Image (tube, rainbow, N blue to C red):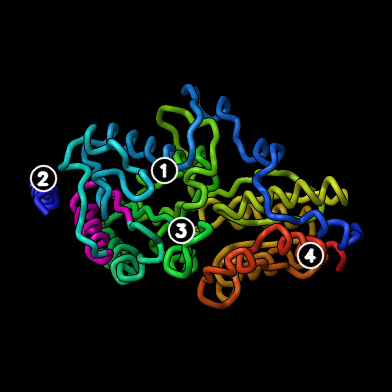
Amino acid sequence: MNSITSAIRRVVSPLRCNTDQVLRGCQFRSLSFAAQAAEEKSIEETTPNPAVKMNLFTAVNSALQVALATDDSAVVFGEDVAFGGVFRCSSDLQAQFGSERIFNTPLCEQGIVGFGIGLAASGTTAIAEIQFADYIYPAFDQLVNEAAKYRYRSGGMFNCGGLTVRTPCGAVGHGGHYHSQSPEAYFCHTPGLRVVTCRDPFTAKGLLLASIREEDPVIFLEPKVLYRASTGMVPEGDYEIDLGKAEVVRKGRDVTMVGWGAQIRVLLEVAEQVEKELQVSCEVVDLQSLLPWDVDTVSKSVQKTGRLLIAHEAPVTSGLGSEISAAVQENCFLSLKAPIQRIAGYDLPFPFIHEKNYLPGKQRCTEGVLKAIDY
C-alpha cells in the first residue's frame, strides 16, 4: 500500500475434396516447421534493431522494459507483479526501476482498474495487470462505464488514454472454467476501448508498446498457452506494430481463414495440411486488433477467395465471429461462394476434462474448410 500511496502522490504532485482423406490426418500436434516459418515476420524489414530469440513472456517483459525506460511516468502494477507475476512477465522490473514504479496491489480487480484510470487521467502511463482474464469481470464497470467514456463525457477535456490493462487469456490445457476464458466479445461491444491481442513474441512486443502509447485505453489480451510455447526472433530495442490493422500471415486463393491469438497457430497448420493433401489454398488473416477490427483487409481477402472461416475459442453465440460474419455478409455478399463458417467454443462453461473437444482445433477447422469448399 505504501507503493500505491507514493505513486498517487507522485502523480498528483472452386474445388472438391475427399473429406475422409484430410480428416485422417487431423491430429493435435505442435506447430510444423512450415507453419512456424509462416508465423515469423521479417525482422529486418520492420526494424534495424538486432534481434534475439525470445518466447512470448520474455517479449512482454522486454516491451515493459522499453516502455519504462522511455517514459519516466510509466508504472506497472497488479497482483504479484513486484516479484515477476505468476507468468514471470514482470520479472526483474522492480530491481531495475524501483518499487515506486513496479508495485503490488490488493487482490481487487475493480480497484486495480479504477486506480489505473485515476493515474492515467492525472497524466501517468498506467500499465495494469489483471492476473487472469477470467477475473476481469469485477472491473467491468470501471472499464466500460468509466475508462471507455472518460473522454466522451468530459467533452474532450479529460481522458484516461494512458491506461493499458494486460491480462492472460484463453485455454492452457488445465485451466478449467476459471482460468481459460476468452472475454474479448464483452469489451468489443464498447466504444471508447481498444482491444488487442498477439500471436507470437514479435507481435506481442510490438503491439504491446503501441498499446501503451495509444491515446485510448487498451485491453491487451495475452494468450497464456503461448507464453512459453511460442518462440521467435524479436528486436531488442524499441518498435511498434500499428493498431487497427490485420495481417495476412499466409496468402491463399480458395478460402479466407480469420482468427487471432493462439488460434492462428491452429489455422496455419490447417492451411498447410489442406494445401499439401488436397491442393486447397487458404489465406490466413490475423486480426491482431479486435476493436476496432480491420474490416477492409478481411473484406479484400474474402472478395478474392469467395469463402470465409472464422475461428475463436470463445463461445460461438454472440462471439466476435458473429460481428465479422455480419460485416462480411454486408460488404462481400456478391463475392461469397459458400455460407460463412464459424468454428468456435460451444455455448457452455469452459470444461476441464473435455477441453480438447471444446476448442476449435484442427479437425473442426478442417471440417469447416471442407464445408466451404464442397458447398
Q: Quadrant of residue 334?
A: bottom right
Is-magenta flag for residue 3?
Answer: no
Q: Is residue 276 left or right of residue 173?
A: right
Q: Which residues are magenta?
A: 109-129
Gap in Å between the C-alphas at discs 3 and 4?
33 Å
Q: Amino acid at mark 3?
A: Cys
Provide the major secondary structure of the magenta segment: helix
Residue closest to the eye, 343 or 375: 343
What number is the disc on residue 169? 3
Q: Amino acid at mark 1?
A: Ala
Gap in Å between the C-alphas at discs 1 and 2?
25 Å
Q: Are marks 3 and 4 in contact (CB under 8 Å)?
A: no
Q: Give SS at disc 4.
A: loop
Gap in Å between the C-alphas at discs 2 and 4?
57 Å
Q: Which residue is denoted by mark 4 in the rendering? A: 336
Residue at the image point whose x is 36% and y is 44% from the top: 88
Instruction: Sort mark 4 into few (<14), some (14-19) or many (20+) by Cα contacts within 10 Å.
Output: some
Report the number of discs: 4
Residue 20: image location, x then y, percent: 87, 62
Residue 169: image location, x then y, percent: 46, 58
- Which mark is first along the chain, 1 or 4? 1
Q: Which residue is denoted by mark 2 in the rendering? A: 10
Is-magenta flag for residue 113?
Answer: yes
Q: Which residue is denoted by mark 1 in the rendering? A: 210
